[in-house]
Amino acid sequence: MCGIAGIISLSDKPVRTNNISLMTDAISHRGPDGEGHWSTENKRVVFGHRRLAIIDLSENGKQPMHYLDRYTVTFNGEIYNYLELKEELVKKGYIFRSDSDTEVLLAIYDHKKEHCLQDLDGMFAFAIFDHTTQQVFCARDRFGEKPFFYSHFEESIFFASEMKALWASGIPKEPSKQRIFDYLAFNRMESFENPESTFYDGISQLKPAHYFIIDLNTKQVGKQLNYWHIDLNKKSTLSFEQATSEFKRLLIQSIERRLRSDVPVGSSLSGGLDSSSIVSLISTMKAENQHQHTFSARFPNFKKDEGAYIDLMNEQTGSEPHAVFCTEESLEETLPDLFRIHEEPFGSTSIAAQFKVMQLAKESGITVLMDGQGADEYLAGYSSFYLNYAAELRSSGRSALAKFKQSYQTHFGTNLETGRTFWIDAKYPDLRDLIRKLKNKTQKPQYYKQFDPTFLDSVKTGTYKTGFKNTLNEALLDSLTKNSLQTLLRYADRNAMANSREVRLPFLSHTLVEFVFSLPSSYKIREIWTKAILRFSLSDLLPSEIVWRKEKVGFEPPNYKNISQEQVTWAVCLLVKNHVLNPNYILPEKNWEYVQVAHLYES
């Protein structure tokens, strides 16, 4: 786990090599254990690296790393199945001088070139220079756990793990008017139409599950090419009992691989099903005299504090608990740091609590944290997926839908306060009208008058369809690849790396994800249970109070989105000055969003 940076000249001129030090200095928090810089003899390719030593702590694991007198890499992430890959490569005659996964990556790239990406189980962003072909191969992991930003500037390509490294090299910081409009008008933190875009003009990101090649001979940058997708037509024939057994096996395999480390590993524990599942399974793998450390955010005297469930899991697994107790004041104090760390808008102060958990892990000497992120997105963990499931049942026959509705009403009733009974409403007894409305529904900006007229003229101001899906799998695919997951992964990466910690996500094993998508929808929502296959596969291991919890508690700290009036005034003045807001139509409903956007303009 590290920070990477690089500059590639698209002309015959050498790059300014002193820039690479400025770039790696800007992301030194990502790698406090060492740094390295390297360039070709003609200075047309320069790589930089900041090291957070996780696997092979010796000097043999330092980067940029060279291999076979042909390849040089700067690599951020972990290849979890590196031992299995190494064993196969040794059989093919490859020789290794280190115990690192980085050297395995170089060897398998030599063996398979871009096709090696299919074999990697991991989170990664890297660039490999091939001295023979004079090409730079850049790639990012399937889900986008690790960041890769780049910019075409002054006849060169600059890339780095964070945008602050690009700015340090002299690349202009120019907020994107289009992304600002989409955020203020539609509350969109990702761009579905242009997923490679960022909140800054001139800076792009390599999309998840994509790679591109920079050719020094032709001085051309290739298009981003996709190397992985989920096939919704692949169907499993396993029974529910067989599927739960296979799911558990794959989850255990994922956890075992992600426990590989030469530094201490702990776990985030929220008290929910996902993190509790990981903590529980780890407790069955560790040695008898080995302590498992858990890290939690607690909210004293707050109704959404999950301390009872956290205590229950720690007691059952014999884990050593660590908790940070967050208050309104402590979270608000963290916001100035978070604006700088995250570079782009974030949704709520909940990430301040996550940041403090990472701080606590650092103070406790635990370098790696396992986390349950990603499970909700493809196991149907959110209540909104009930509607997609109901639509799918409706298409298969009214009896299936009626049975599901009856089961739902038995468990949840028809109290609208649960937030999950919208599809049972008497106005839509057979879902037909509701589904039609959702398909044709568009998100319309309600506050056009807040914008400066010249600002509106400079952006695309159309409406966006919500894209309701008729089947659960289609909705889950959108959730995993297009909606909130990218934002959540950014939060986790920046919060962890700001504290020089590594986060590993066992639920985002691509083998596990592919398997779940091959299963029938009734294996994910069974009767009324979301994430059914996870619940049933671990029902004999987890406390029943956690396995069969009906409510889904969002990670929301006290005083959600709290911002002082002083901050709002500063933000409004700055945005009016930059011709984003119309001073005659400032609406108080946008306080939080104004402050977020204003920080994009800070130098």
Image: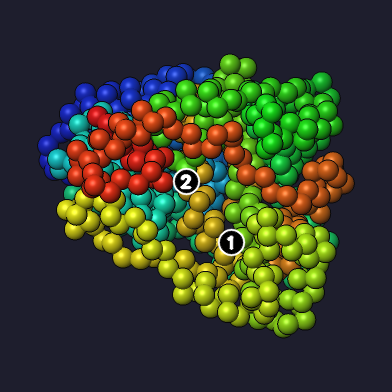
Helix or strand or loop: what does disc 2 sit on? Answer: helix
In the picture as drawn, the residue positioned furthest to the right comes out as 540
Q: Position of residue 17 (x, y in %)?
A: 21, 26
The residue identified by callout 2 is 487
When the figure is inspected, residue 293 is found, relative to residue 283, above or below; the finding is above
152 relative to 60 in the view: left or right: left
271 relative to 61 in the view: left or right: right
The residue identified by callout 1 is 476
Q: Quadrant of residue 412?
A: bottom right
**131 or 373: nearer the viewer:** 373
Q: Position of residue 450 (x, y in %)?
A: 29, 50
In the picture as drawn, the residue positioned furthest to the front comes out as 584
Q: Amino acid at mark 1?
A: Leu
Q: Quadrant of residue 594?
A: top left
Helix or strand or loop: what does disc 1 sit on? Answer: helix
Residue positioned 53% across, 23% down in the render: 329
**What is the quadrant of the C terminus in the image?**
top left
In the picture as drawn, the residue positioned furthest to the bottom comes out as 397
